[in-house]
Amino acid sequence: MSCDLEQRKIVDEAEAFVNQEIRPYVKCFEENKGIPRELIDKMAAKGYLAAALPKQYGGLELDPVYYGLFTEVFGKACTATRSLITVHTSLVGETLVRFGTEEQKNKWLPRLARGEAIGAFGLSEPDIGSDAKNIKTSWHEEDDCYVINGTKRWITFGHLADLFIIIAANKGRSTAFLVERAFPGFETKQIEGMMAARATCIAELYLNNVRVPKENVLGKINLGFEYIVSTSLDCGRYSIAWAGVAIAQEALEAMVSYSRTRTQFNEKLRSFQLIRGMIGDAVTKTHAARALALKAGELRKQKDPDAVMETTMAKYFASKVAVDVANDALQVHGGNGFLSEYPVERLYREAKVLEVIEGSSQMQQEMISSFGLQRYYKRR
Ligand SMILES: Cc1cc2nc3c(=O)[nH]c(=O)nc-3n(C[C@H](O)[C@H](O)[C@H](O)COP(=O)(O)OP(=O)(O)OC[C@H]3O[C@@H](n4cnc5c(N)ncnc54)[C@H](O)[C@@H]3O)c2cc1C
């Protein structure tokens, strides 16, 4: 791991990169329903597709706190590139680092870091989302391989990715497989008409008798949930916590800036008490979300067993804050807030996604309350 100064420099350089290469083009990405290949290549050349991965595989090896700050930099400007980092680096890359065999790691991690292969994570299905233990995609064994059948839905970058972690079930137990786009029987179709995440190439995946070599099991047979899904979603939730902080911060800045320039009743909006109330709330909530995300990052850095629950709370809280602050930021913009020339229109749409992905807010509340019922029970 690099020292703080080096890591700070990487985050600052990433911010300059985002402001030059990404921020001005975000609307085009949405219109084109994807991000350009050249941008992915530029991100890869800077190491940004492997910011959290070990240097031996071509990563930047940022520690969790700096990786969070790095994620925020992308998330403030652009959901698509932030989502790429969430899925490609956090869900796929970090899970491979943790559970991949040496062969799997040596084969895939350098390619993921160089952007030669894009990773995606396939758990959700048309009929199964929150109740993910009951997925219908199935696997069975044949002589020299495992055969997978089923449909996956909502897979971020699924229409672009080359390598997929696919979760499939057999007799009620699930297993994770590394599935390559080139495998016969594997097809994808981009999902159209999204309110948000329009440039993230979200796809439905079709697996029709896909034969997967035995060495492509990730982790252990029948331990897909215990090993892979729980780890991937934990890494993904940490990334989404920072995506929430990012949207809240960007919306707060937009709200404050607009309130200082727009005049009504011969006064700037910022002088009206009801507007100031929204700004006060937005500042407080954004700071609180950041504090939770930073605490989760510190605990992850120390490999503290409480890191998973703190991450869940940070994800739950920061996505809620992103929705609240984006909502108030749009309110402060009045009619202009509905125009795509102002940032709050996009932030308002993108914030809502965070309350659904990587486990919905209701699922996070369930987990947090189970934890609280144990941790805070005082027999008096
Ligand atoms: C933009 C986007 C990107 C995504 N990317 C991916 C991806 O890359 N890979 C992937 O595998 N999936 C992905 N998903 C899918 C996402 O993980 C699911 O949408 C999410 O898990 C919720 O599942 P669902 O949509 O089927 O909703 P459902 O599970 O049908 O839930 C509907 C509503 O009911 C609530 N609910 C369900 N059960 C309960 C309960 N027991 N108690 C209280 N409330 C409950 C939920 O919170 C939700 O509000 C993505 C989704 C979106 C929108």
Image (cartoon, rainbow, N blue to C red):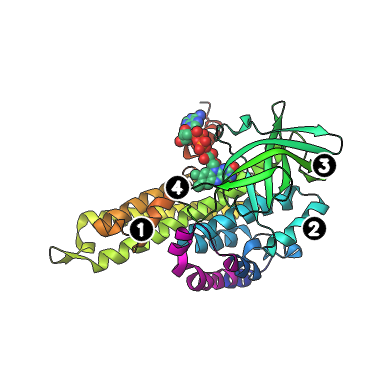
Residue 82 magenta: no
Helix, strand or loop at label 4? It is loop
Q: CA distance from mark 3 to mark 4?
A: 37 Å
Amino acid type assigned to the residue bearing label 1 in the image: Val
Q: CA distance from mark 2 to mark 4?
A: 38 Å
Q: Residues within 10 Å of mark 1 (few under 14, many from 20)?
A: many
Sequence-wise, the earlier of marks 1 and 3 is 3
Amino acid type assigned to the residue bearing label 3 in the image: Lys
**Residue tagged by mark 3?**
214
Sequence-wise, the earlier of marks 3 and 4 is 4
**Residue tagged by mark 4?**
193
Q: Disc 1 vs disc 3: which is toward the camera?
A: 3
Q: Is residue 320 left or right of residue 277?
A: right
The circle on residue 135 is none
The residue drawn where x is 39% and y is 56% is 346
Q: Is residue 79 left or right of residue 162?
A: left
Sequence-wise, the earlier of marks 4 and 1 is 4
User: Residue 124 placed where, x, y %?
Assistant: 58, 39
Q: CA distance from mark 1 to mark 2?
A: 42 Å
Q: Quadrant of residue 130?
A: top right
Q: Is residue 187 left or right of residue 11?
A: right
**Residue tagged by mark 1?**
344
Sequence-wise, the earlier of marks 3 and 2 is 2
Helix, strand or loop at label 1? It is helix
Q: Disc 4 vs disc 1: which is toward the camera?
A: 4
Q: Disc 3 vs disc 4: which is toward the camera?
A: 4
Q: Report the span colored magenta.
A: 10-39
Q: Does residue 258 show up?
A: yes
Instruction: Say whether marks 4 and 1 touch (CB < 8 Å).
Output: no
Q: Residues within 10 Å of mark 4 (few under 14, many from 20)?
A: few
Q: Is mark 2 within 8 Å of ligand 1?
A: no
**Residue tagged by mark 2?**
106
